Image: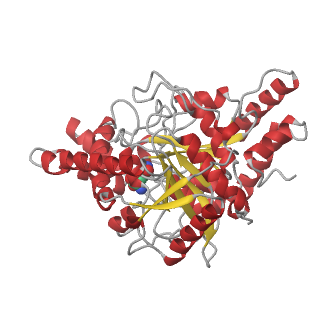
Amino acid sequence: MSIIGATASELLGLMERGEATSVEITTAFLDEIQAHDEKVGTYVHVDRESALAQATEIDQKRSDGQEIGKLGGLPVAVKDVLCTEGVPTTCSSRMLENFVPPYDAHVSTLLKDADAVLIGKTNMDEFAMGSSCENSAFKPTRNPWNLEHAPGGSSGGSAAAVAANMAPISIGSDTGGSIRQPAGFCGIVGMKPTYGRVSRYGLVAYASSLDQLGPMANDVHGAALLLEAIAGHDPRDATCINAGVPAYSETVDQPLEGLRIGVAAEHFVEGLDSEVEAAVKQSLDVYRSLGAEVKDITLPHSKYAVATYYLIAPSEASSNLARYDGVHYGHRAEEFEDMVDMYTRTRGEGFGAEVKRRVMLGSYALSEGYYDAYYVKALKVRRLIRNDFDAAFEDVDVIASPIAPSTAFKLGALTDDPLAMYLSDIYTISANLAGIPGISIPAGFSEAGLPIGLQLLAAPFQEEQLLRAARMFERETDWHKRRVSF
Ligand code: GLN
């Protein structure tokens, strides 16, 4: 079996049977990065020596007969928003260009405990603000299926890494769709767990009431395995729920009997690409053929989701990003006249245009006189959006929808039109506002050869059901088996 293009469980099988070592597997992926990443722009940091040293250590543990973690020897790519001790963590921003965290995020520690090999840090939209990876201060990432197109964002590097066979699994973060939308654009599996399922300790904050870390993989089983490794309680994140983590990878292959799938008319309106719509409708037929019942539901407040998100997320961002003042860490302007000038120049030089736009939008929405009219009102609408989901999940187990209104757009196509860029998150944002889990799975290709994703959403903490529902579909289809070749 070839290492490149294999799934996480296939690679683990190779290592368990002694047919490949972690060093061989890690080398194969590093070689792929060396050969092709100049074209794709997936990684912002790769340390070959360190990756191979980690792999050697794990191989040694295995040959000594020591107990091996769940990800024993698997390379994992990590979005550059997660702190990794001694390894640069830039958020693809000039502000943190030289930042090397002195500590590990909780998820970084869990990856090490699970014996994963950190193969590299991936490119992203600056501070996770964007939907195309074009807001990186360093370079855009390209869509591996067509290098003229965007991979989606903001976890575009983590999605492209898996799609371009430069890592079998990766970690992304999702505040308004940043795991699921790029997973859809790149034809892989990406999951945002329930708010509170995974610790955000050491995740550089964008919008704290929405941010969540999650797994990306080339099949549902890989996502289940990675979620199992990173989920669970951490007292250092006060929003992280103290509840047991089911063995997702062990139950994922059990199909769900009598699955009820909700479909909302609000998700199939003007602006939805006809090829995407057709693929989603065909996916529903696949579920019907497996005995699932497809039911109409209504999410009447979903039309307000984008507007609500673009008040709440920038408000929280404007507050979170106030810490980049040139004093504690990060960039500091070299020349300045006084303290205020130092702050102004530091932030002017360190942040890109989109980050500045968000800070200004957020500061405006939180300012006296506008706070009640904008921010508080957005919080109220957020509650109505959650109520819609609570009502829907009384009748259905999962909700199916497109992941994005179109397939991956061309690089540069939306950069001059922020509103059009924001609208590409129309299907993903509600899950963050409601705090519920969602997954994107490969569900087709357009005539132009670009992937189409199907989104499934579930009630809070129903990740196990969600993964099983996704895997049922995956087993009947072969969209997830297609691989990019350069
Ligand atoms: N595209 C959305 C934004 O720009 C979502 C980003 C994210 O989930 N991090 O805010």
Pick the residue in front: 427 or 5.
427
Left or right of residue 49: residue 38: left
Eyeballing the image, is 77 above or below 186?
above
Pick the residue in front: 443 or 1.
443
Percent of width and height locating residue 217: 65, 49
Left or right of residue 384: residue 332: right
Q: Residue at x 69, y 44 (%)?
A: 254
Eyeballing the image, is 295 above or below 464?
below
Percent of width and height locating residue 35: 74, 58
Percent of width and height locating residue 249: 68, 39
Confirm whether residue 338 shows in the render. Answer: no
Left or right of residue 372: residue 393: right
Q: Residue at x 67, y 57 (%)?
A: 474
Pick the residue in front: 224 or 371.
224
Image quarter where the C terminus lies is bottom right
Label count reads 0
Pick the residue in front: 264 or 152.
264
Percent of width and height locating residue 346: 32, 43
Q: Specify the color scheme.
A: secondary structure
Q: Farthest left residue?
A: 369
